[in-house]
Amino acid sequence: MDIEKNVQLIKERIARIAGGRPVTLVAATKMNDKAAIQCAIEAGVDVCGENRVQEMLEKLGQEAYIGAPLHFIGSLQKNKVKFVVGKCDLIHSVNSPALLEAISKKAASLDLVQDVLLEVNIAAEPTKTGFLPEDLPQLLEAAGKFPSVRVRGLMAIPPKSEKTGENRGCFAQMRELFIDIGAKKYDNVTMDFLSMGMSDDFEDAILEGSNMVRIGTAIFGARNYGAAAASGPRINGGI
Ligand SMILES: *Cc1c(COP(=O)(O)O)cnc(C)c1O
């Protein structure tokens, strides 16, 4: 795998589609080791995004992410909040009011403010977590009660697309939510980041307004799930 070349190609594709609009390239680093991650950082990814708390802690111990900011992009359980808050610049995956509250409490105890995104279950898939669009206003109102978090935007993982263009509708719905919320005034809430788009659909996501893409396979190659099966069950339906 030529990680450097892959990153260059992806950056070119992003630039072509974005037409001058800034788009943050998050390398989804799960199941890749320090050497691969350092290669991606040197090649110019903007951010590293990690999925599982345990894996992130191990790699932090190895200084695998030196040179780039770190985001947490996987699903986060409440009892693991304490390992993540303060270690990541942005948590993409806040999917319940209880999680928002737990993050705020931990951040307050560390005397810092944690930036987060709200995860939207945009296709209302029963197998996925995330807020339904209709639940967002209530949560955004509640964000004002948690002074140690800042909601910086929205994140979505639409259904796995079989064909190019299939998720355009989901991405467009996300853009509308992002714009509508941004036009309103909620305490502790700004709509700066719209995190959507992965290896198979990032161009469509950018066309529909994404300004933060999370890309794994197209940078690092296919992940070898067989080799990692011993390390525990997969969360988040094969992602
Ligand atoms: C793994 C992962 C990605 C990247 O997926 P690819 O299809 O490999 O690009 C993006 N977002 C999240 C939350 C992920 O877990």
Image: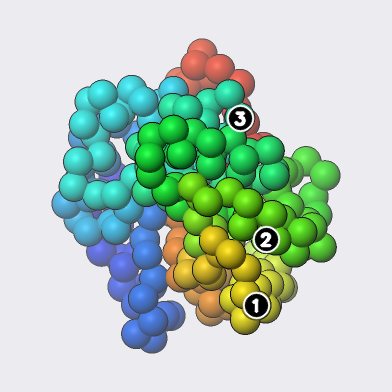
Q: What residue does disc 1 label?
A: 184
Tell me which numbered mark, 2 or 1, is placed earlier along the sequence: 2
Q: Is residue 170 above or below residue 147?
A: below
The kind of secondary structure element at disc 1 is loop
Q: Is residue 78 above or below residue 72?
A: above
Q: Nearer the viewer, residue 31 or 54?
A: 54
Q: Amino acid at mark 1?
A: Lys
Amino acid type shown at disc 3: Lys
Q: Earlier in the sequence, mark 3 or mark 2?
A: 3
Q: How is the image coloured?
A: rainbow
Q: Nearer the viewer, mark 3 or mark 1?
A: 1
Mark 3 crowd level (few <14, some 14–19, many ≥20, 10 Å Cα): some
The quadrant of the rendering that contains the C terminus is top right
Q: Which mark is residue 78?
A: 3
Q: Position of residue 97 (x, y in %)?
A: 70, 44
Mark 3 or 2: in front is: 2
94 is higher (above) or lower (below) than 188: above
Q: Residue at x 37, y 65 (%)?
A: 24
Count of numbered badges drawn on the protein: 3
| Residue 114 vertical placement versus 52 (above, below) | below
Q: Tag 2's secondary structure? A: helix
What residue lies at 69% left-to-right and 43% top-to-bottom? Answer: 96
In the picture, residue 43 is in which quadrant? bottom left
**In the rendered image, is residue 119 in sight?**
no
First reached walking from the N terminus: tag 3 or tag 1: 3
Distance from label 3 to label 1 (Cα)? 29 Å
Other residues around mark 1 within 10 Å, as few (<14) / some (14–19) / many (≥20): few
- The disc labelled 2 sits on which kind of residue? Leu
Instruction: Report x, y in % for residue 135.
Output: 79, 58
Residue 140 numbered tag: 2
